[in-house]
Amino acid sequence: MSETTALSLEPMVELPGFDALEKVLDELAATASAKEIWAALGQAGLIEQVYRHGSAGGGVIPSRLARVLAAVDERFPVGTTLSTCVQLATVLPILAGDEGLPAQTLRRALSGAATVGLAATDVGSGSDLTALETEVLLGEREIVLNGTKRWITNATTADEFLVLARHRSGRHFTNFTWVLVPAAATGVAVRPAESDLFDGSGVGDVTFEEVRLERSHVVGRPGRGLASFARHIATERLAGALWALALCRRTLEHTLRGLSVRPHQQGTLWDLDSVRQRFATCLVDLRQLDALTRELSDRIASRYDTSAAALLKAAVGSTVDKVLAECAQLQGAEGFTPTGAQRLRAQAAIFGIGGGTTEVVRSTVADDAVVVLAELDPSAWPCTAG
Ligand SMILES: Cc1cc2nc3c(=O)[nH]c(=O)nc-3n(C[C@H](O)[C@H](O)[C@H](O)COP(=O)(O)OP(=O)(O)OC[C@H]3O[C@@H](n4cnc5c(N)ncnc54)[C@H](O)[C@@H]3O)c2cc1C
């Protein structure tokens, strides 16, 4: 099956060079940092090839995003894939909405020369995005930013931060604006997160204290911040699903190899029917997630369908939990080694937290209950004669 038909996505002319992906990554040391990986991908022209017509504003090509995330996930730690994922899915597409100074940062990011952190989550409000307190005063020539962002991927390594701030008080969705902040600007302070689970991601907290910048650092129109975030977080949720599929698949493969050689009585653990049935349940769960991802990927990538993205993310959180918990148990004590599933299971809990917790996306699914049910009506199926 070709790359395009595999996910039944838009017709696509094969741009030269994308097949170099695995080779480019294989040439890097296993210890390469997320920044080095980003630079290698950018220099090989692979970042821009993830987007339709090579433009981050054109939306992602899901099959290509899937391949990049799977290839990075296979070779590098979870934190490194996280770093790549957030930038590809969310940061670059948001930057693409502006012709001015952000366009320069976008060009540098596409070429791998710059990395950019997405700083949306506030220290106080967390999931409750419209309560965020980070504030930007918009002057005619100068802007002033104050606030603290928590658990920001690439915080300790980014060259710039794309910061979601409020320019007006109140919860209305037009009160928020994106600002592009150089990490080296006076008043920016970064602190690594107190966890080694995401080593390689540069995750940490970022404080902005009286950060003064020229007005050109505003990204897009003031007041469009939350609307553009909602649109592009949809792509991040799709990216999460694509990455989760790759991560669960490789963990199931690893587990199957272990079960197939682990002696038990006259055979191996894989000969035990109860073990095979538990493993099969994981396969069924993963195939269901795969089917849902294929069904919804185009709606999310081309139309930024936030309902579809919430549905998919709600499925990802629970599937990853179930599959990795079963793999970890089936690996026995081996599960606690560095390549075992126990640590991976803790790391992969990020799929139910980052980019919107499972509960938050379930609320969105509930909001769309009538539409979800209508889509399940058999009369909505395409009619094929015979
Ligand atoms: C490794 C990592 C990387 C991250 N990277 C980034 C990044 O790059 N950029 C960025 O902006 N943010 C990032 N985040 C932050 C992430 O988006 C937030 O952690 C997430 O949105 C949840 O917010 P919170 O942690 O404050 O949880 P809280 O809002 O405090 O929620 C805690 C728990 O309360 C429950 N809960 C919360 N709200 C509801 C609700 N409405 N209904 C029912 N239950 C609810 C849920 O069980 C939830 O898990 C990252 C987080 C991690 C762990």
Image (cartoon, grey):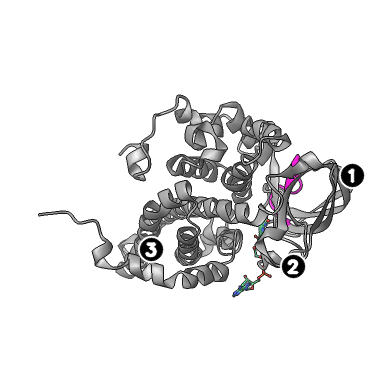
Residue that appears at 58% across and 32% down = 41
Q: Position of residue 342 (x, y in %)?
A: 56, 62
Mark 2 residue's CB less than 8 Å from ligand 1? no
- Residue drawn at x 51%, y 42% is 59
Can you see residue 80? yes
Q: CA distance from mark 3 to mark 1?
A: 49 Å
Name the residue type under label 3: Asp
Marks 2 and 3, how far apart in space?
Answer: 42 Å
Question: Label 1 to label 2, Cα distance in Å?
Answer: 28 Å
Q: Quadrant of the C terminus?
A: bottom left
Q: Which residues are magenta?
A: 151-163
Disc 2 target residue:
170
Is residue 159 a member of the stretch shown in magenta? yes
Closer to the chain start, of discs 3 and 1, is 1
- Give the labeled residue for mark 1: 186
Q: Is residue 65 left or right of residue 14?
A: right
Asked if residue 382 is positioned above or below residue 221 in the image, the reply reads below
* Mark 1 residue element: loop
Disc 2 residue type (three-letter): Gly
Sequence-first tag of 2 and 3: 2
